[in-house]
Amino acid sequence: MSGTATGGSQKTILLVEDEADLAVTLEYNLQRDGYRTRVAHDGRTAIHEIDQDSSLDAVILDLMLPDISGTEICKHIREQERTRDIPVIMLTAKGEEIDRVVGFEVGADDYVVKPFSVRELLLRLRALLRRAERPGASTDVLSFDRVRLDRDGHRVWVDECEVTLTALEFRLLHTFMSRRGRVQTRDALLSDVWGIEADVTTRTVDTHVKRLREKLGEAGRYIETLRGVGYRFRDRPIDED
């Protein structure tokens, strides 16, 4: 199912929502804001659209679907090389922080809890699309001691071993490495990594930093905790005993 917008952005958005009335409202507002739309009311249709439509620019994804959960669909998006960098906004009636953490862990870029303002959703979507359009904003390859990050390839290595990161963990590491030696407060990381006023607490930052360190192994020590302030990626290698 699809519709075509007459506005100027001409970005294509896949809306995955099983509540028919809400889907109609969101599709109308997306088209009025200048987006092309694709609509799926269940997980299987969503996966078919994701696999077949190479024009998708973002996905608005309901967490609770009748067949396949939104988290599984998000994982599917992140596992495919062609789609892994597509921005994903999760919609859900679940508002507990643990649900948001799980959403971000599987690769969601933002998380909106029902009931929500359609205007706020559109603002968050615009912010994510703007961020995705800045491919030349920073160095393509960052290297520091044992860690190498390929921004365009969305790949990370520690020594010669590739490390698999979620989209959000990748952005977090890229932010740290591109600002090496500078203190990053939790609020700054929420703004720069999670995006426009993400509805999460600073504990979410701590959770993701902990998981990132674990995945980096010994290289996780490059990310220093400054108690009461935030974090800092070291500006010089650690001397080995």
Image: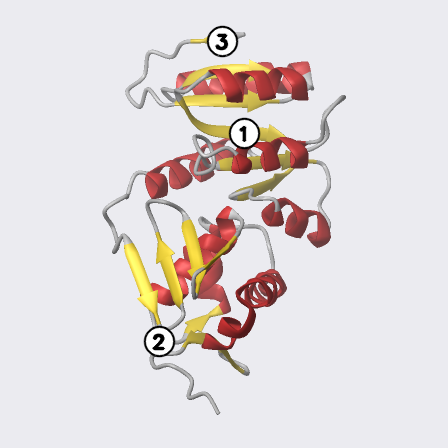
Identified at 67% across, 14% down, the residue is 20
Q: Residue 78 appears at what percent x and percent y?
A: 53, 38
Mark 1 to mark 3 CA distance (whole Å): 14 Å
Q: Does residue 76 appear left or right of residue 122 in this picture?
A: right
Indicate which disc residue 15 carries: none
Query: What type is the residue that disc 3 sits on?
Result: Ser
Q: Quadrant of the N terminus?
A: top right
Q: Does residue 95 appear left or right of residue 10 in this picture?
A: right
Residue 41 visible: no
Identified at 72% across, 30% down, the residue is 64
SS state under label 2: loop
Q: Residue 124 appears at what percent x and percent y?
A: 46, 39
Q: Residue 239 appears at what percent x and percent y?
A: 42, 88
Instruction: First in sequence, mark 1 or 3: give its number.
Output: 3
Relative to the observer, which residue lies in front, 158 or 75?
158
Residue that mark 2 sits on: 182
How packed mark 1 is, by other alpha carbons closer than 10 Å (few <14, some 14-19, many 20 or more), is many
Mark 1 to mark 2 CA distance (whole Å): 34 Å
Query: What type is the residue that disc 2 sits on?
Result: Arg
Q: Residue 189 appears at what percent x and percent y?
A: 46, 62
Query: What type is the residue that disc 1 sits on?
Result: Ile
